[in-house]
Amino acid sequence: MGRLTEKTIDIDDILKDKMGDKSKFVPDVLVSWLKRIVHQKEVNDFLWENREKQGVEWLDACVRYLDMTLEVNGRENLPDKADGRLYTFVSNHPLGGIDGVALGSIIGRQYDGRFRYLVNDLLMNLPGLAPLCIPINKTGLQSRSFPAMVEAGFHSENHILMFPAGLCSRKQASRIHDLPWRKTFITKSIETHRDVIPIHFGGQNSPFFYRLANICKALHIKFNIAMLFLVDEMYKNVHKTFRVSIGKPISWKTFDNTKKPMEWAKIVEDKVYELE
C-alpha cells in the first residue's frame, strides 16, 4: 500500500475542504510550512501504527507516545463507577490538546470508557478518538447544531468531560489562565441531575504561543491562528510530568436560583484554580 493512502491528516485535503477552488492559490511554500507546523508526517505515522486502537486504548497509546507522566492527586474524589449516576467533569484547558488526551485516559480507565467530550470538529479526523467525541464546529461561525450536540451528550448514558472555556488558556496579567467559562455545563448539569467534578490540569504552552495569541487579539484577528500551532506545542511538551488535581464532587443542587448560571460557572472555575 502506498504511503499516501495511509494519511489521515492531509493539509492539502483540509485546505480544499475549507477553501474549495481557492485552495489552489495558496502558495506551495505556505502549504509546506503548514505541514511542518502540524507535524503531518509524525502524526500520520503515529495514527497508522495505532490504527487498530480506539477509545481509551487509543488515548493510552497517545500518553505513552508523548511520554507523559501524570501525577494524579485526589483520585479518591472520583465517584464509584458502580453508583449508577452520571457526572460532568470540568477542567481548565492549559494545553489545548494533550490535556484532553490525558484526562480522557484517566477518566476513561476509571469508568470503562463510558464518557464523552465535546471537541473541535478537526479532531474528528482522528479515527481513534472519534468514538468518544460529540463534535462541535468551532472553526467558523458557531454551528447551528451546537444545542443538539450538547443535548445528545448530556442526555446520553455517558459521563461528560468538558473544557468550559472552549479555547485553551491564555496569558493574562502575567499568569496562564482560562478565558471566562461558559455556563452550559451548569445549566445542563442541573437539567440532567449530574454532579460536577472539578479538575485542575497543571501545564502551559510556550511563551511564543501566548505572544502570538495576544498579538492576534490586539490586532482583532478573528481567525484563531494560535490553534494552528497547538500540535507543535504538543510536541514541545513531550517527556514532561503533569500534575492533575481532582476536587470533590459539587452537587447539582448547589446551583440554585440565588445566582445566575454564569455566576455559578465562575465559582466552579475559581474552585478549579484553588486545586492548583
Image (tube, helix red, strand yellow):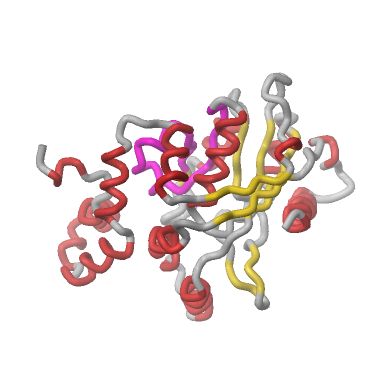
Q: In the image shown, does 189 or 199 lie closer to the viewer?
A: 199
* Residue drawn at 26 percent across, 47 percent down: 45
Q: Dividing the image into 4 quarters, which one contains the N terminus?
A: top left
Q: Position of residue 149 (x, y in %)?
A: 52, 36
Numbered-mark total: 0
* Residue drawn at 28 percent across, 39 percent down: 49
Q: Is residue 262 visible?
A: no
Q: Dividing the image into 4 quarters, which one contains the C terminus?
A: bottom right
Q: Which residues are magenta?
A: 113-135
Farthest residue toward the right? 258
Q: Is residue 242 visible?
A: yes
Q: Would you place residue 83 above or below residue 239 in this image?
A: above
Say whether residue 124 is magenta.
yes
With 258 as the anchor, is 184 left or right in this view?
A: left
* Residue drawn at 14 percent across, 46 percent down: 4
Q: Position of residue 269 (x, y in %)?
A: 73, 54
Q: Quadrant of residue 249?
A: top right
Q: Position of residue 222 (x, y in %)?
A: 46, 68
Say whether residue 166 is magenta.
no
* Residue drawn at 30 percent across, 58 percent down: 39
Q: Position of residue 43 (x, y in %)?
A: 31, 50
Q: In the image shown, does 263 or 164 lie closer to the viewer?
A: 164
Q: Would you place residue 113 above or below residue 65 in this image?
A: above
Q: Quadrant of residue 155?
A: top right
With 54 as the anchor, is 200 left or right in this view?
A: right
Q: Quadrant of residue 257?
A: top right
